[in-house]
Structures are given as structure tokens and as C-alpha cells.
Image (spheres, coloured by chain):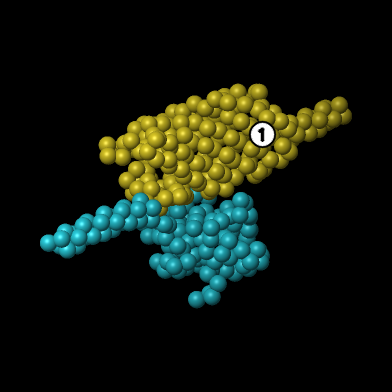
Chain colours: A cyan, B yellow
Amino acid sequence: MKKLKKIFLILIVLCIAGGGIAYYYTFHKPHKNTFNLKAEYSLSAPELYSEYENDEDNANKKYLGKILQVKGKIVNIKKFDSNYEISLKDEMEGITCLVDSNYAVQQKKELDNLKPEQLISIKGQCNGYLMGVKMDRCVLVLDNK
Amino acid sequence: MKHIVLSIVTILMFSFSMNAQKTFYTKSGYIGFFSSTPLENIDARNNQVVSFIKTADGSLNFGLLVKSFKFKNALMEEHFNENYAESDKYPKAKFKGKILNLDEINFDKDGTYNADIEGKLTFHGVTNKIKLKNVKLTVSGDKLKGEATFTAKPEDYKIDIPSVVRGKIAKEITINVKIDYSIY
């Protein structure tokens, strides 16, 4: 009988602990890591831009909030507060990709070596269209698969 | 001859004054918002804000993508996008306004000026008229820095907050704007 009580107590403690951990992970779950995410669409910077230019609503239905892999020519690289902003295709009419500082630290060497005119692949979340297509949580795709 | 000289002088003056009218712009401005309650602090940052200021008429334009607001907490970001801002339905927010005291600001002279701004803010498909006092504009050469803080109420933008989480979201949200403009 005493043993049963003990098991019962242990079970209750485990339940509370489990609930606590579940609660913690629901409310403190980390952001998805772009490195581990598979791109839902893979396309070139001019393709993505022209889809948005031709029909923004339709492009939004397809791409908004999704992870895209975009291949394009660098026109500009801007660094601010250890974030990198890389513009592909065109400064005004192109794709702006924000590599946030937490990703940038992992690819600092590669990012610092980027040069205009270079062809690169970038993976990140599409936020929509406003003076070009905006992406963030971006990472460089280095193996060019 | 006199006429020709006069017209040349007029043309020169005219073109000079045309040059003095500038457009400042950025496409990587910052807007963040903050909600503070004893239960929870919510903080979101957007570093992809597009903005133009035309010095000729003092008109201001701001545009941002709602999905560019980043939260530290992934769940908050999810709730913000799905339940409150509905960013799939309303992907953009914008502000169109005017500097009211344009005569007090000299965009050609370095210095810090206080601007009063009035305009229309559209968020979550709702447009409200807002007025901002003492917006700090700092001119230094070809650069212009703009800084503003104001508050907004979620219910003014038809954002329903369920009573369960009401205590976690402030009645008034503080919005911070920091823009570094360059000449367009």
C-alpha cells in the first residue's frame, strides 16, 4: 500500500514536471532556424521580382511568409548593427535580403567576402512586396545545390 | 541685351531653387513597437521600412511590410501575424503625412529641428488620422535623421484582443521610429 502511494506520488510529480516543460516550450519555443528549413520554392531573382511586379496579390498568395531560395546577382551589400542587407538584381527593383545578426555570425567570413556582381543563392522568409521584394531571416546557401 | 542677362539670371535662380528641393529616402528604416504590462513585455522590430520626405512640400511617406516585424518570442510573432495584424490579409502598413511647420525647418542647413506632423496611418486595413508633435529631424549634409515616438490603441485599428490575454497587452502601444535618410 505504501509502495502504491509512493508510485502515485512520483507519477503526480512527473505529470507536473511534464506539464511545466510543455508550457515552457509552447511559450518560449525558439524561432525556426532557416539553416534547417527546406525552401518551398526555388527560383531566380528576376523571376521572383517579375511575378510580384505583374500580380502582387497572386504572388503573395504563393510566397508570402514562405521560405524561398533565390538565386541572383548582388548589386549592393550594406552592413548595419552586424546585420547584412544584400540586394539582388537591382537596388530599387529587386530582392532585398536581410541576414539577421544571429545568422550573420555563423557565416561572417562568407558574408564579408561577398562582392557586387557575384551570383549567389539565398534562403529566407518572403515578407512581401514594397519597393522590391523583401526577405529576412536569410542565410547564404553555399553549396549551390 | 539687358533682357537676355535678366532672363539668364532668372533661369539660374530658378534652377538653383529647384536644386534646393530635395527628396530624402530610405528603404531600411526602423520602426519598432513596445507593449509593457506587469505580466509581459512585447517588443517587435522592423528594419525594412521604406520612407520618403519631399522638402518642397514637406510631404512624408512611410511604408512597411507587417511580416517584417520580428519578435524575440516565436509564439508572439505567430499570434501577431495570424490573430492580431492578420498579415496575410493586410500585408502592408503605411503612413502619408505632411510637416505642418515646414517654414521652421531648413533642410539645407545642418542642425536639429522639431517638426509637427499630421497624417493618415493605415494598419490592419483601418486608416486613422494621427498627429505627432516634436518629431526630431537632424540634418547633416546630405543625410537626414528622423526620430519619433507615439502611441496607438489596438482597438482603433480593429484589433480584437481576447479577454484571456487582455492583461498581457498594453492598452496603448508605444511606437518608435528611427530613420536614416539619404538623398534620393
Tell me: A142 left or right of A1.
right
Examine the rendered structure and indicate whether residue A126 appears above or below residue B38. below
* Residue nearest the viewer, comparing B138 with A47: B138
Numbered disc 1: secondary structure? strand
* Residue nearest the viewer, comparing B44 with A29: A29
Residue A137 visible? The answer is yes
Chain of the residue under the numbered disc 1 shown in the image: B
Tell me: B56 left or right of B71.
right
Residue B99 visible? The answer is no
Tell me: A135 left or right of B52.
left
Q: Residues within 10 Å of mark 1 (few under 14, many from 20)?
A: many
For the point 44% across and 67% down, the residue is A36
Q: Place residue B135 in its image quadrant.
A: top right
For the point 49% across and 31% down, the residue is B150
The x and y percentages for residue A56 are 42, 53
Q: Place residue B163 in its image quadrant.
A: top left
Looking at the rendered image, the quarter that the N terminus of chain A falls into is: bottom left
Residue behind mark 1:
B138
Tell me: B99 left or right of B158.
right
The x and y percentages for residue A67 are 43, 62
The x and y percentages for residue B172 are 41, 31
For the point 29% across and 56% down, the residue is A17
The x and y percentages for residue B42 are 43, 42
Q: Amino acid at mark 1?
A: Thr
In this view, which residue lies farthest toward the front? A2
Number of marks in the rendered image = 1
For the point 65% across and 63% down, the residue is A112
